[in-house]
Image (cartoon, rainbow, N blue to C red):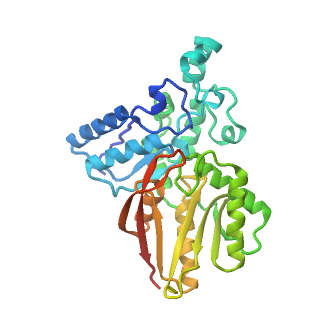
Amino acid sequence: MSDRLLVLVRHGQSEWNLKNLFTGWKDPDLTEQGIAEATEAARKLKAQGLTFDIAFTSVLRRAQHTLDLILAEIGQTDLPVKEHMALNERDYGDLSGLNKDDARKKWGEEQVHVWRRSYDVAPPAVRAARRAYAGGGARQFAARADHGSGKTFAEGNSRARTRNRRAGDLSVEHRRDRCVEARSGVSAAVQIISLDAPVTDGALDQLAEVLVDCVEGGASVSFMSPFSHQQALAFFRKVAGSVVTGDTVLLAARLGERIVGTVQLGLDTPPNQPHRADIRKLLVHRSARGHGVGAALMAQVEEEARRRGRWLLVLDTVPGENGHRLYLREGWTQTGLVPDYALFPDGRLCDTAIMWKRLDG
């Protein structure tokens, strides 16, 4: 078997790196310097003549932007990409957004050093829901890297401290098994259900949680920050009304008993378009990414369209984002790009790509 090479890349300078703020799971983008750093790293990879089979990244924008810049520079924008929150850096909890120098003045140099560099001590007040899965220390990162893909483009703070401790723990065969596991597709734990009318209050509440998380994560899905749970509930109540009238098919993805993703099939097309349907609001909670939730939802929504005689599907999405890459992998065709079409939740302009797919059978 030929030798295999794993390349680890840290993201370029982020907006919060520049401001000397604790970042963790917060989601600032790259600065101009960070973009230049990522591009320079890509040029060095290109100069080595390297090509890749697959890329892994966290769900954080700075890591994904770095990856996109590298793939564009080396000419591999169609490379399969796996996003997983297990590759996030540690969650800094209550420290997130604080200036590091101010934190040292408040808690002392030694304590802040422990929070930043320790292997098994989490920063203060990491939320319970996160601690259960992701925690805040490098030990928890190592555990979730084993649980998830555990490969390239992990956030630098956690990855660098974990690499030396974990690299010797796994045999070559064990590491290869993990890679196959990560590439195997949709997790068997993902269940896709159709939320028929009337949609229960419990389901609406969980759907609202997914929407709020996506907006907080910077997704351009019609809403602006700050965005409340009540606003999300109001949106899904309107959707539930269109489910009652038969204008919308509302699907939800469950991991265990919790709804972690959703997508809609819009059937309210004009009389001269009885063969067409719209795909709307594909949403996956950041805590559930990496399990194939989006792919499972798209496969099921296409089946729902077939059942109703709809064989031409249309959607719009932000180019370069997670959804855009998913649609390309699932055989969708981009037919155009509209610049400055919408806004991200923080007010920045974003483009939109118009995509379509013709269904077989």
Residue 10, given in percent of the width and then of the height, sits at: 40, 35
Left or right, 85 with respect to 191, comes to left
Residue 238, given in percent of the width and then of the height, sits at: 69, 67
The answer to whether residue 168 is seen in the rendering is no
The quadrant in which residue 187 appears is bottom right
Position above or below: 170 against 84: above
Q: Which residue is at 53% across, 26% downward? A: 21
Residue 282, given in percent of the width and then of the height, sits at: 56, 62
Viewer-proximal residue among 114 and 271: 271
Position above or below: 203 against 96: below
Residue 48, given in percent of the width and then of the height, sits at: 22, 40
The answer to whether residue 54 is seen in the rendering is yes
Number of numbered tags placed on the structure image = 0
Left or right, 66 with respect to 101, comes to left
The quadrant in which residue 281 appears is bottom right
Position above or below: 119 against 277: above
Q: Which residue is at 70% across, 30% downward? A: 125
Left or right, 207 with respect to 3, comes to right
Q: Which residue is at 55% across, 57% downward? A: 221
Position above or below: 303 against 336: below
Viewer-proximal residue among 170 and 239: 239
Viewer-proximal residue among 162 and 293: 293
Viewer-proximal residue among 72 and 186: 72
- Looking at the image, which residue sits at the far right? 201
